[in-house]
Image: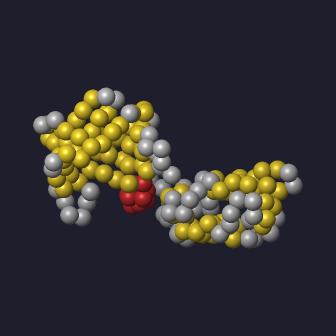
Amino acid sequence: MSVVYTVYINGREYRVERSEEDTLLINGKPFDAERYVVNDGVMYRFNRKSYATYAVPTSDDEPQYHVTVNGKGMSVELEDEKTALMKSFQIGKATQLQSATVRSPMPGKITRIMVTEGELIEAGQGVIILEAMKMENEIKAPSAGIVKAIRVKEADAVEKNTVLIDIS
């Protein structure tokens, strides 16, 4: 599972994603990245260029920092996926988070689970592939929220109305 942040640097927005394989994507563009802790800061190498960085938190309750990169100061704010989603709901960009249960609409076999526990999902997002009568059916989330529990495993046989996923 990759980790995604929205990073605001001096008011500009960047999407930063780090995969399990330690691949770094910034606004969809891959970067070769290395990180080294040195003295009071961190040395980063992006695409073979080195940057000495120092970060000082500027807020106790918000992930905001004053960051110095090679001597140049800047304001940086981090938002993880959950914070970004919650923020979008607060300003009316999407529907509210709701508790929901995803149930099997028919008997079948679970062939693929497309989400993980703790993942933020959107209403209508595919969460499970259910094979029934030799056809694969994508089961979608009825509402936006966080996957609280996955109650089945791949290859499980399920009956109609079996609880597959709990969303909170």
Residue 44 screen position, x and y as percent: 27, 39
Q: How is the image coloured?
A: secondary structure
- Seen at 85% across and 51% down, the residue is 134
Residue situated in front as seen by the camera: 133 or 21:
21
Determine whether 56 is above or below 152 in the image. Answer: above
Determine whether 77 is above or below 100 in the image. Answer: above
Residue found farthest to the right: 133
Lateral position of residue 167 relative to residue 157, left or right: left
Determine whether 145 is above or below 81 in the image. Answer: below
Residue 77 screen position, x and y as percent: 27, 50
Residue found farthest to the left: 71
Lateral position of residue 151 relative to residue 55, left or right: right
Residue 45 screen position, x and y as percent: 29, 35
Instruction: Give the quarter of the image for residue 64.
Output: bottom left
Residue 155 visible somewhere in the drawing: yes
Determine whether 28 is above or below 167 in the image. Answer: above
Instruction: Give the quarter of the image for residue 87.
Output: bottom left
Residue 75 screen position, x and y as percent: 19, 46
Residue situated in front as seen by the camera: 25 or 123:
25
- Seen at 39% across and 33% down, the residue is 31
Q: How many marks?
A: 0
- Seen at 54% across and 68% down, the residue is 148
Residue 139 visible somewhere in the drawing: no
Residue situated in front as seen by the camera: 56 or 76:
56
Residue found farthest to the top: 48
- Seen at 78% across and 60% down, the residue is 109
